[in-house]
Image (tube, helix red, strand yellow):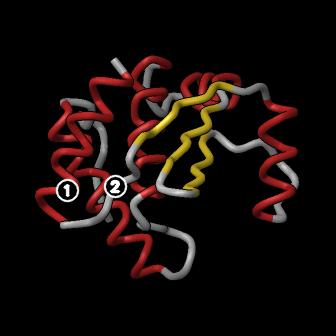
Amino acid sequence: AIRRDLVRAAVLVRRRWRVRLPATVSVVFVGPAESRSLKRRFLKQDRAANVLSFRYNGEGEIILTPAVIRREARRGEARYPIRLRRMAVHGLLHLVGQHHEPSAAAARRFERREAELLRHLGLAADVVPR
């Protein structure tokens, strides 16, 4: 399901926003310790991430941390399989240069685009952009 979601999302992203996609995208699953190490090394934050995205030499990598995503799902954000698929799409947005960290306006733009993709994929029943 993740592969299908990413392919469908990539087609929409390329058509709608005219952004350059990586030639290939790998999806990697890691444990919390590895996620924390990567986030500390590259983002200077000392906690495990639900998703990290890296782009290099025309390649993209989406790193998912199932334990973190499962914990978020238990808090009621969505059932685990749906939350996992949503985080993969979230990672794809980061790969194409969309970011929510710089400002409130960037966060709103990111959330609108993410909600559009999730609706397109049928994963957005409870996603409401700000």
Residues at marks 2 and 1, CA–CA distance in whole angstroms = 7 Å
Side of 63 where 67 appears, left or right:
right
Q: Position of residue 8 (x, y in %)?
A: 20, 35
Mark 1, secondary structure of its residue: helix
- Tag 2: residue type? Leu
Numbered circle sitting on residue 84: none
Measuring 48% from the left and 33% from the top, which residue is drawn there?
77
User: What is the quadrant of the C terminus in the image?
Assistant: bottom left
As drawn, 56 above or below 69: below
Measuring 70% from the left and 23% from the top, which residue is drawn there?
67
**Callout 2: 10 Å neighbours few (<14), some, many (20+)?**
many
As drawn, 84 above or below 43: above
Task: Find disc 2 in the rendering and name its residue.
Answer: 21
Q: Position of residue 58 (x, y in %)?
A: 47, 55
Side of 32 where 52 appears, left or right:
left
Q: Nearer the viewer, residue 18 or 98?
A: 18
Q: Position of residue 73 (x, y in %)?
A: 54, 26
Measuring 44% from the left and 70% from the top, which residue is drawn there?
107
Dividing the picture into quarters, in which one does residue 14 lie? bottom left
Q: Nearer the viewer, residue 34 or 79?
A: 34
- Residue furthest to the front in view is 57
- Tag 1: residue type? Arg
Dividing the picture into quarters, in which one does residue 31 lie? top right
Q: Are marks 2 and 1 in contact (CB under 8 Å)?
A: yes
Mark 2, secondary structure of its residue: loop
**Callout 1: 10 Å neighbours few (<14), some, many (20+)?**
few
Side of 98 where 35 appears, left or right:
right
Q: Position of residue 119 (x, y in %)?
A: 18, 41
As drawn, 89 above or below 19: above
Numbered circle sitting on residue 14: 1
